[in-house]
Image (cartoon, grey):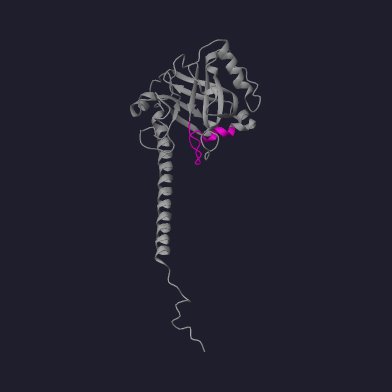
Amino acid sequence: MRSFRGDSRLIKPPSRAWLVLSILLALAGVAFLALFGYEQYGYLRSSRYYAELQQVACTEEGVAKPASKIDFAALQAINADTAAWLEMPGLSVALPVVQAQDNQTWLHQGFDGTPSPEGCLFFAAPCGGQEDLYRVIYGHNLHTGSMFSGLTNYRDQAFWEQNPTFTLCTPEGDETWRIFSCHEATDTEELYRTGRTPGEEYNAFLQELQVASLYDTGVTVPEDARVLTLSTCSTSYGSGLDRFVIHAYCESDSE
């Protein structure tokens, strides 16, 4: 009878290469979990900070009110680039908007200047001309639903019908803006060019924005109206080249 005792062919110990590979995979798993946890902490910290910032931004009751309901002095003491405050109740957006000399500074910095996955809402960098006539505000589309993630709700006409306006607060006063167009875009389109001036060319451009809308809003945009474009990535996981935008004109100017 053949004996199997001591037959090394039956049970082979793992090779050194296999042990090394197993250890490396385990370490990679731990590193991934640590990185994921750190990233989620960053989102949580940023969300809490912006929630607290809303309390800082509101002027105190009983105090003589300035042109805006927002305490811009308090915000500018934190961040000198503070330019406006955007409120879109339908999207639970109540956030500061900053203005830098480029489109990179506030992509991954929070309002307090610390690294943040949410970044800030920010105006497109100045491009000469009459900047107040046509401006663009950028914001991230994030899986957490913060910042400009909710803009894509405007793909649905019923949502626009319930939320056709938003408020932009500035040191000069608080303005109502009426949305007249919502559509998909790419990052190279003409709509991202600012520095525009009044006239036939500008009014033709506004008509193009209206025609591009996913649905007919029926909104009549006055000639030479101040227009604001809000822009975000089309999805929270895309390349960033595909965008979703909404266009609105300043209704307060005609009041």
In the shown orientation, is residue 124 left or right of residue 213? left
Question: Which of the image's four quarters has the C terminus?
Answer: top right
Asked whether the viewer can see residue 43, the reply is yes
Residue closer to the observer: 149 or 236: 236
Q: Where is residue 148 in the image (x, y as percent from the top left)?
A: 50, 33
Note whether 240 is above or below 19 in the view shown. above
Q: Which residue lies furthest to the left in this view?
A: 77
How many numbered marks are there? 0
Residue 210 in the figure: left or right of residue 167:
right
Q: Where is residue 207 in the image (x, y as percent from the top left)?
A: 61, 18
Q: Does the magenta stretch include residue 203?
A: no
The answer to whether residue 62 is seen in the rendering is no
Q: What stretch is highlighted in magenta?
A: 139-153
How far from the left and from the top, in percent, is residue 167?
A: 51, 24
Nearer to me, 55 or 5: 5
The residue positioned 41% from the left and 42% from the top of the image is 42
Q: Name the residue at the top extreme.
A: 199
Q: What residue sits 59% from the left and 27% below the top? A: 182
Residues 236 and 147: in front is 236
Q: Is the magenta stretch mostly helix, strand or loop?
A: loop
In percent of the image, x 46 and y 23: which residue is there?
Answer: 169
Residue 17 point in image, percent of width and height: 41, 63
